[in-house]
């Protein structure tokens, strides 16, 4: 897949950063000395962490060179490094591993989540937020568009790019063995956007990438137009002429046993 595009991602920066703020608000730590922003992207979540824990060493980790470059430009005094959440190792136990909108791209949560918890200091916190929107019309329409065009063969792997999230009970059972507290909740945001075309622009920065990256030229244009048309019925115009994008997200905050 092509690298991430920080500018496209940040076109909806306020909306995308709000769940990071909501997640951080539930982190039960007064202070921290080592904080990891896993999947830091362009540094928007790292900025929140640095403001909340001004005395901590805050490190942003990501697999995308383009995102790390954007993060370094945003926070020139920050520390940003290439690292993969699936194989993460740390130089010392962390007080907080913060993973906002990243682990939905990482498979094998049964292995990865307990491992992340094991990288924390006693009493440390794993804070995770993941979009739980694969059954929303925005994502059903992606799969339908992919399967119903001449590009279906090229897009046969796109559907598997995102991890299908296990139910909250599964995360609870995975984490509670080594945690003194596991807090899990869903929030459904309802984002007013200008039109179905704006929904396309939103998902172009994230969930649509595996579907459009393998396409080129006219094919990409046709895919995007076919996808936009499929959004018109499930996202009708509201009283002010805009549409509402319902966006369910799953939050998990686990505190490692002291
Ligand atoms: C949707 S952005 C989230 C950015 C930021 N954390 C935020 O709160 O908006 C997801 C980021 O996860 C990164 N990513 C995807 N897979 C990853 C992995 N296996 N390990 C680390 N980062 C990964 C991507 O490169 C991208 O920058």
Image: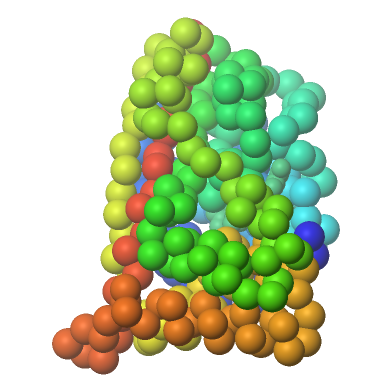
Q: Nearer the viewer, residue 242 or 50?
A: 242
Whether residue 236 sits left or right of residue 176 in the image: it is left
On-image quarter of the N terminus? bottom right
Q: Position of residue 16 (x, y in %)?
A: 47, 63
Q: Nearer the viewer, residue 183 or 34?
A: 183
Identified at 43% across, 48% down, the residue is 132
Up/down of 230 relative to 60, above or below = below
Residue furthest left in the image: 239
Whether residue 150 sits left or right of residue 239 in the image: it is right
Q: Quadrant of residue 34?
A: top right
Tell me if I can see residue 51 in this picture.
no
Whether residue 214 sits left or right of residue 229 in the image: it is right
Identified at 21% across, 83% down, the residue is 238
Identified at 60% across, 67% down, the residue is 146
Q: Position of residue 157 (x, y in %)?
A: 70, 53
Q: Nearer the viewer, residue 141 or 28?
A: 141
Q: Quadrant of residue 68?
A: bottom right
Q: Nearer the viewer, residue 12 or 218?
A: 218
Identified at 52% across, 77% down, the residue is 227
Q: Position of residue 55 (x, y in %)?
A: 59, 39
Up/down of 44 relative to 116, above or below = below
Whether residue 28 sits left or right of residue 32 in the image: it is left
Counting every numbered tag in the picture gives 0
What's the image's color scheme?
rainbow
Tell me if I can see residue 155 in this picture.
yes
């Amino acid at each position: 897949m092509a690298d991430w595009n920080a500018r496209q991602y940040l076109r909806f920066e306020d909306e995308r950063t709000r769940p990071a703020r909501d997640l951080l608000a539930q982190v039960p730590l007064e202070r921290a000395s080592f904080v990891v922003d896993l999947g830091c992207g362009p540094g928007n979540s790292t900025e929140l962490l640095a403001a909340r824990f001004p005395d901590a060493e805050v490190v942003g980790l990501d697999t995308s060179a383009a995102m790390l470059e954007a993060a370094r430009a945003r926070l020139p005094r920050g520390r940003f490094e290439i690292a993969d959440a699936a194989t993460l190792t740390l130089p010392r136990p962390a007080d907080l591993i913060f993973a906002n909108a990243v682990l939905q791209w990482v498979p094998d949560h049964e292995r990865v989540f307990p491992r992340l918890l094991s990288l924390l200091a006693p009493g440390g916190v794993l804070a995770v937020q993941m979009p739980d929107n694969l059954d929303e019309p925005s994502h059903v329409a992606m799969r339908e568009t992919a399967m119903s065009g001449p590009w279906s063969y090229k897009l046969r792997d796109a559907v598997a790019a995102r991890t299908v999230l296990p139910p909250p009970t599964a995360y609870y059972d995975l984490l509670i063995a080594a945690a003194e507290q596991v807090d899990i909740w869903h929030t459904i945001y309802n984002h007013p956007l200008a039109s179905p075309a704006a929904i396309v622009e939103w998902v172009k920065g994230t969930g649509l990438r595996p579907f459009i990256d393998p396409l080129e030229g006219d094919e990409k244009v046709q895919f995007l137009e076919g996808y936009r048309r499929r959004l018109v019925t499930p996202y009708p115009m509201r009283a002010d002429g805009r549409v509402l994008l319902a966006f369910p997200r799953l939050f998990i905050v686990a505190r490692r046993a002291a």
